[in-house]
Image (cartoon, rainbow, N blue to C red):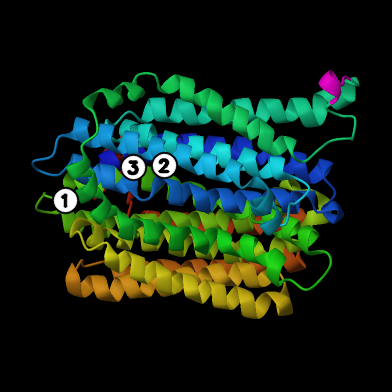
Amino acid sequence: MANLKSLAKDTAIYGLSSIIGRFLNYLLVPLYTYVINASSGGYGVVTNLYAYTALLLVILTYGMETTFFRFSNKEGEDPDKVYSTILTSVLTTSVLFVALVIGFIRPISSAMGYPDHPDYIWTMALTVAIDAFQCIPYAYLRYKKRPLKFAALKLGFIFLNISLNLLYFVFLPKLGVNPFGIYDNGIQVGWVFYINLFCTAFMTLFFFGELKGFKSGFDWSLMKRMLSYSWPILVLGIAGILNQTASQIIFPYVYKGEDGAAQLGIYGACIKIAMIMAMITQAFRYAYEPFVFGSSSERDSKETYAKAMKYFILFTLLAFLCVIGFMDILKYIIGEDYRVGLKVVPIVMAAEILMGVYFNLSFWYKLTDQTLWGALFSGIGCLVLFAINIIFIPKIGYMACAWAGVGGYGTATLLSYFVGQKKYPIDYPLKDIFLYCLAAAALYACMVLANDHLGTWAALGVNVVLILAFCALIAWRDFPLSSLPVIGKYFRRKA
């Protein structure tokens, strides 16, 4: 229980920074979707290129975050040497990547569908290279259990990014100021990428202490051992991120209509509302990964992992119901032109929950150094996702993108669970999990009926009652009042 409390505390700190950060980032969604008309396809460009960025970030870190946690906690390994070697390796590969992109910028930009804007491509490449390098100092902060600095840096980047976006897209145009002629051709979507590059590069200055890690030097023999561990994680990571981004990458090539960029922009805007689930899974991942590797030698570790899975599902279901219940308010995050795509939100959130479950299940092969299994599961899930996208995007448009995520993660989750129970059995509380899922599904159905047939305020009232009912179920089964601090003693006396 002490371990779970420590995990909860770190998750809360990471989660607070993630939730506040994502919430502040949401300010950019209404900004872009109110300034950039849906029919122009400008937000579709942003959605498409950021999908490439997410994929490239996984490739350029090539599993070294997880590898760092594994080898830093491995008996006989020097954590400082592990950190220094990984830091040097990721810096080198990032520099090589940027050099290759700039050297072949014309053919690359043409192949990606942006022959008139190679500046978008090299800006994206430089940004993701710096981002990949920063992932290692961020991992070092997690290893050293310094969530406050981690959170401060993440939030600092977001505040700077939002401020500069507001300056370019709102304040300077309203003031009629045109420094350096940047508005001669009107507001340009490319400034989304230029601002991101500046902010990413600027934050590197705050890793001065962590970058001293270079002093321990580079160990090639250690690097070879780590690469043999990490390459399946790279495959796993590529397949995993493709499950999140492949739809946005594939869509322009598969969609038959001439409004492809506009439709992709609608999908990209609406899934931002569903990203509350991504916040929770990301916060959990930041805390859970070092926690698992650090506690793997403890006698009751499997019982702890089982409880962590249950509580993860429990709270993500609660978050799901909250988003659906307050959809009539949350929809104003995006411009009116984009709201036609709101029907994808519950589907994308379901996919995010499955992704989190899959992440929980993934530790059996990481702890047993059998990461090849993870690559296999994610690869199969990715093939399912590709198939759904290619077959159904021409028929049902961006709805296929949403369902493809469910199909891909659902496949990978089932494979990991059944194989994992044979290789590294964990007694997950399946009955409890099923009960909560069934209750959430029933309440979701009631919310949909309320949203469709009642007025806005009446529906909100009904939905709040339904959310409280789910909270009451949680309290009754897993968090009885007698266990609460301060007031719990009064209920224990009555008992």
275 vs 219: above or below = below
Identify the residue at image location x=72%, y=72%: 397
Mark 1 and mark 3 lie on one chain; the one further toward the N terminus is 3
Per the image, the residue denoted by label 1 is 296
Which region shows up in magenta? Answer: 177-181
Q: Amino acid at mark 2?
A: Thr
Mark 2 and mark 3 lie on one chain; the one further toward the N terminus is 2
- Mark 2 element type: helix
Per the image, the residue denoted by label 2 is 93
* Picture quadrant where residue 146 is located: top left
Front of the two marks 1 and 2: 2
- Mark 1 element type: loop
Identify the residue at image location x=69%, y=26%: 164
The answer to whether residue 90 is visible is yes
Kindly identify which numbered label has been placed on residue 287: 3
Q: Nearer the viewer, residue 312 or 390?
A: 390
* Picture quadrant where residue 126 is located: top right
Instruction: Name the spot of residue 440 as percent of width and height, x first.
Output: 50, 66
Q: Nearer the viewer, residue 99 or 131?
A: 99
173 vs 74: above or below = above
> Quick check: 116 left or right of 411?
right
